[in-house]
Image: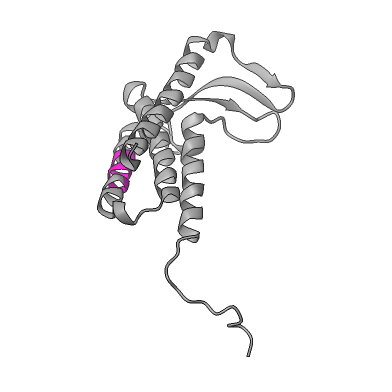
Amino acid sequence: MSKKISFILSTVVLVIIDQISKYLIIINKNKLPKVIINNILKVNYCENRGIAFGIGEGTVQLVSIITIVIIVIILIAIYINYSKIDNKMLLGSCVMIAGGIGNLIDRIFRLYVVDFIDFSALFNFPIFNFADICVVIGVIIIGIAYLTIDRGENIEKDSCKK
């Protein structure tokens, strides 16, 4: 299977996982919150009408447009530089784009993002979802890929010694 098809299929699968998880939360929201691990993790239902951590509440259209622009820019960059992109960078982009699309779908069709992973009993942290995890993991993978790119630079091992 080609890298392009793997990229597309992986992105679609991650978006589907995100949307199924949110659908399951929505249809079961009357049974929530549900403690999964005492004093650590619970599943909860939260409508996030902003962006990360609820910042920018009420700006759904603007956030949606910005998200679309960012995704398009990333896809264009991948298309233009495809032959030079290593697998780590492609994987990170795939995971990050899937997360962006997952939350974009919520914003377009629900006008809010469904969040449900709740660690607030352990520490004060906002509730989040699978798409958020994808964005963060994608950014981390891209960062690692960027830091480990072989740029063909010759660095002497003892360059600090005189």
Whether 30 is among the magenta residues is no
Q: How many numbered marks appear?
A: 0
Q: Can residue 58 be seen in this view?
A: no
Residue 55 shows up from this direction: yes
Q: Where is residue 37 in the image (x, y as percent from the top left)?
A: 71, 23
Vertical position of residue 5 compared to residue 145: above or below: above
Image quarter where the C terminus lies is: bottom right
- Please state the horizontal and vertical placement of residue 160, each as a whole percent of the image: 61, 83
Q: Residue 114: give x, y in percent of width and height.
A: 46, 24
Chain part drawn in magenta: 67-74
Q: Nearer the viewer, residue 110 or 130?
A: 130
Q: Does the magenta stretch include residue 71?
A: yes
Q: Where is residue 15 in the image (x, y as percent from the top left)?
A: 40, 28
* Vertical side of 152 occupied by 28: above or below: above
Q: In the rendered image, which quarter is residue 156 located in?
A: bottom right
Pick the residue in front: 35 or 88: 88
Task: Identify which residue is drawn at 51% across, 48% down.
Answer: 140
For residue 111, side relative to residue 119 (left or right) = left
Asked whether 47 or 151 is in front, the reply is 151
Q: Residue at x 58, y 9 (%)?
A: 31
- Residue furthest out toward the right: 38
